[in-house]
Image (cartoon, rainbow, N blue to C red):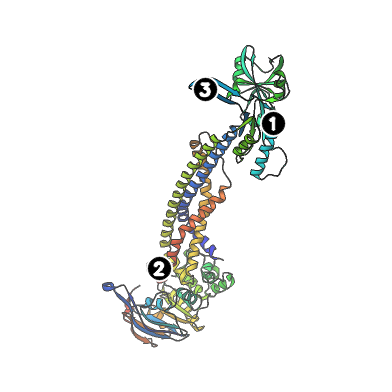
Amino acid sequence: MKLYQIVGKDIMRRKKRVLYAALGVVIGTMTVVGILTIAFAGQAKIYKQLEQYGPNLTVIPAINNLDMKLGNLSMGTLTVGENYISEDQLPKIRQIADSKIREALKITDEGDIATIAPQLYENTKVNGVSLVVVGIEPQEELKVKTWWDVGKGEYLSGSDDALVGAIAADLLKLNVGDTVALNQTNVKVTGILTETGASDDYQIFIPLQTVQSAFNKEGVISSMDIRALCNACPVEMIAESINKNIPGVRAIAVKQIAQSELGLVQKMNGMMFALAGITLVVGLFGVVNTMMSSVHERIKDIGIMRAVGASRKQIVRIFIYEAVLIGIIGGIAGYLMGTAMAYIIGPLVFEGTTVYFVPQYFPVALLVSIFVAVAAAVYPAMKASEIRVADSFRSV
Amino acid sequence: MLEVINASKIYGEGEAKVTALDNVSLKVENGNFIAVMGPSGSGKSTLLNIIGGLDQLSSGEVILDGNRIDGYDENALVDIRRGKIAYVFQQYHLLPSLTALENVLLPLIFAGKGKNEKDALEILKRVGLEKRASHKPSQLSGGEQQRVAIARTLVMGPSLILADEPTGNMDQKTGNEILRLFTELNEEGRSIIMVTHSAEIAKQAKEIINLQDGQIVDRNTHFQIEVPCLTRRY
């Protein structure tokens, strides 16, 4: 038989007391786990939004509008530069993007990393209505526009297929299976997008090469979206490098908005963590309190143990063992209750956020709670070890 | 051999000052059996506590086997409790959550010899309780609990047993059984110092010490003395 077994037997006799002591730890740990879980869900939501912003970079032709002025008199604007980017630039841009990402993430893999989706915009009239036809590379475009949802029909597969934005389909009264004439080239509507709230709703998407040949724009594109597929990718550096090395184009990083939102979430998390810390400290004092009364209750038992040969250290150890058990109970219960709390409160904090339990937080909860319980036990344990045998029996 | 020299113990200060022991000197040879008698508050328990290092002296000396133990620090006192001196109390002082056997094992566990369940069981057998080994104190009678407490002192093989009214809570028959156990232990060569109120019990000892107001008023090997406190009812 070992000392901890004695502690175990003693705890079984005082179950309620021990559970009561664990309550302080449970509440503290619950708050920490709850906040961590909610913060995790919030961050996941932001990252998802970040993805939904689509490309990390947009490359457009470098057009300079020069204001022509004569004194105070405006003479109009002179536009300098091409309205298109040559397709020849595509491999160069890919090379810059991929090498920067490799550098940042320390990847040695040789394959393509970034997704590059070129687009060619053309104004045209369909059934007398003026709208924009967009030539795209179907697979690449889908990776950039993760929010696209084909409501009716199917996504583009053949070269004569057309994907129609929700409002465009409505205005033109187009349905899946209808044929549309674009500059003498007939394409067939294979799918209609659900409404996105963006300009996509007003556009018709057709494979790039079809648009290029229909409008005699072989070898050129209007813009391209680059998606690095990672949140840590150095988009600003990629943009800078493209701007420096490729003439005639302008690369713009479009990550900032989501990033500032992420910063806000992180600030909020910081505040919530401070709150959780306070709860932990309050819980700690709760445990100190119950432990102290447990010491008083057990003065006689402690005296007995001292009388039959327990050293001060052993008395301290008895209380620390008990604290570890309280910590384990607190960790398990705190994790479960904290996760439950996150499930209830999470969606209220970040509207519409789905909260998932995070198994990695279980060891964290366990460690935090054991630490708090043991820290709380130190003072009562010291007090208990200072009890003099003769005094302990006198008080009974 | 145990020697107490000019031992005094004063509780409190100023007007609340109580002198529990007043300049007590005492010699106990190895193998002696001393009964300590005296009215309540005469300092009997204090004397025991001081001998066993459970309480500290205000002045004086306690010498056990040639070592002065009254000034011992906590660790040294723990060592003494783990072998040389053991206690038996009136209230038995067993841990309620442990079985009889576990209570007997307790000193071994604290001394880091927790794997001696056989020895502990053997000692329980010796006090006639091997069939009660797995009972909790609450399931045992007073006499049985005191036997467990005595077994608990025996596991460490002490040379000196300090007993504070060990039969005080028992009827005469049970008390006599417990006393017989003490006599046996004494016959094995262990010194016993036992506080008691009962002249009947005290008669079984080799010597009787009478305490009054913290002083030894009488030390006697004859048992015909009438002790004033005998009329006390308990």
| Marker disc for residue B145 | none
Residue designated by label 1: A89
Q: Nearer the viewer, residue A50 or A36?
A: A50
In this rendering, is residue A255 above or below B167? Answer: above
Which is in the foreground here, disc 3 or disc 1?
A: 3
Secondary structure under tag 3 reads: strand
User: Three-letter amino acid code at disc 1?
Assistant: Gln
User: Three-letter amino acid code at disc 3?
Assistant: Lys
Q: Is residue A325 left or right of residue A154?
A: left
Secondary structure under tag 1 reads: helix
N-term mark: 3 or 1: 3
Residue designated by label 2: A392
In this rendering, is residue A373 above or below B119? Answer: above
User: Three-letter amino acid code at disc 2?
Assistant: Ser
- Chain under disc 3: A
| Marker disc for residue A69 | 3
Q: Is residue B164 visible?
A: yes
Q: Position of residue A84 (x, y in %)?
A: 66, 25
Q: Could you confirm whether marks 2 and 3 are on the same chain?
A: yes
